[in-house]
Image (spheres, rainbow, N blue to C red):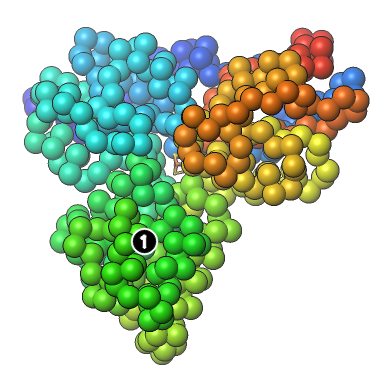
Amino acid sequence: MQEQKYYRKGFKMRGDIQHLLNRDYRSEVVEKIRERGNTLETDGLTLRIADEFGFCYGVDRAVDYAFQTRQKFPDRRIFLTGDMIHNASMNNRLREMGVEFLSQGFDGRPDEKFDEINAEDVVILPAFGAPVEWIGKLRDRGCIVVDATCGSVLAVWKRVTRYAQKGFTSIIHGKYYHEETKATASQTRKEGGNGKYLIVRNLKETGYVTDFIRGRIGAEELKEKLAHGMSPGFDPEEDLQRVGVANQTTMLMSETMKVGEEIRKAMEERYGREHLAEHFELFDTICSATQDRQDALLKLLEDPLDVMVIIGGYNSSNTNNLAIIAKERVERSYHIANGECIQGNIIRHKPPGTPLDPREEVEEEGWLPEGPVRVGLTAGASTPNSQIGLAIGRILEARNLSPEVALA
Ligand code: SF4
């Protein structure tokens, strides 16, 4: 019988690896605080955790598939097309398990190892997915592919593919260097698509597009400003006549809504309300996990807090957006990569709104005020409970407390 080569649903071995996931990613501290309604009060310290935080369904599934894959193929070479998720400890854990990476960081170009893949190898596609061309190459090589692309990412791909097949250009609200956005942009070339896309990162970049649509700037100026996020040979005159808006799943919900609305208004002005449907489509593709975490944080921030701690990789898009939301309401907001960033009264953190780069980290002394203090906590979709538990332990330690005593 011919060996199955493409797996989309893992290997139904969760039961076999659950103990490994528990060992690496569970946290009793987090579970106990959850049982107490996500609040811990002890010796003048009130710790409140958002109702939704940490691992999302897509990340949970991708991590599960990676562990299952190792178990299923103990003797084969296993590769990942890039970071499994934007969490350094998780990626390091996979390296320890012998998983090799075919590209590194946001550069995202496949390295030489990609050309060495053969039919005996196993390649995992992470939750972000991978560009169409990469998947095609892997199929050509006849290797086993374990596809852990999140269903919410697939929903965006479907939308973008449909836009392209209808001859619409996809305007993607996302980060042009992010793996998910690169993979999404590549979907415009699938199944007879027109291959046209334009990536806008924020409202400022959206403003260049709407200025062009309204005739306020020319094609050359637009190309100059957004060159980093355009499909090859992009011709604004031709390619911005019919557009469909989609977004990276982890963007700031409020910003995504505004991006779509700004483009809609500009298209309506140019083509008239009666012709709008022939020139403009919009589909909100923020995933429900991102939305739930942003909503839960906003709810947490309704009550006054003195300090807010956000845990997650510095290159994690959804975590960075949580940090931006928190900073707007709580001046002392700290985005930390993991619990080890807290050492007594010193905290290492990435100031919200700075680029997604670990080198942005700064150190601050006296981060936790003396006396009664209210601390809020949340974590991005790629942060395991074990790291959240560690951070809680460090916060308690900063007040000379311990989880064992506080949660007794
Ligand atoms: S953040 Fe959303 S799209 Fe990304 S893996 Fe999680 S659920 Fe899927």
The local secondary structure at tag 1 comes to helix
Q: Residues within 10 Å of mark 1 (few under 14, many from 20)?
A: few
Give whichever of 332, 42 is nearer the camera: 332
The CB of the residue at mark 1 lies under 8 Å from ligand 1: no
Quarter where residue 226 is shown: bottom left
- Is 42 left or right of 36, judged from the image as shown? right
Q: For the point 25% across and 51% down, which residue is it?
A: 186
The quadrant of the picture occupied by the C terminus is top right
Provide residue 111's location: percent of width, then percent of height. 20, 28
Q: For the point 28% across and 24% down, which residue is it?
A: 101
* Amino acid type indicated by mark 1: Lys
The quadrant of the picture occupied by the N terminus is top left
Q: Is residue 317 above or below residue 392?
A: below
Provide residue 97's location: percent of width, then percent of height. 35, 12
Provide residue 406's location: percent of width, then percent of height. 82, 15
Residue topped by disc 1 = 225
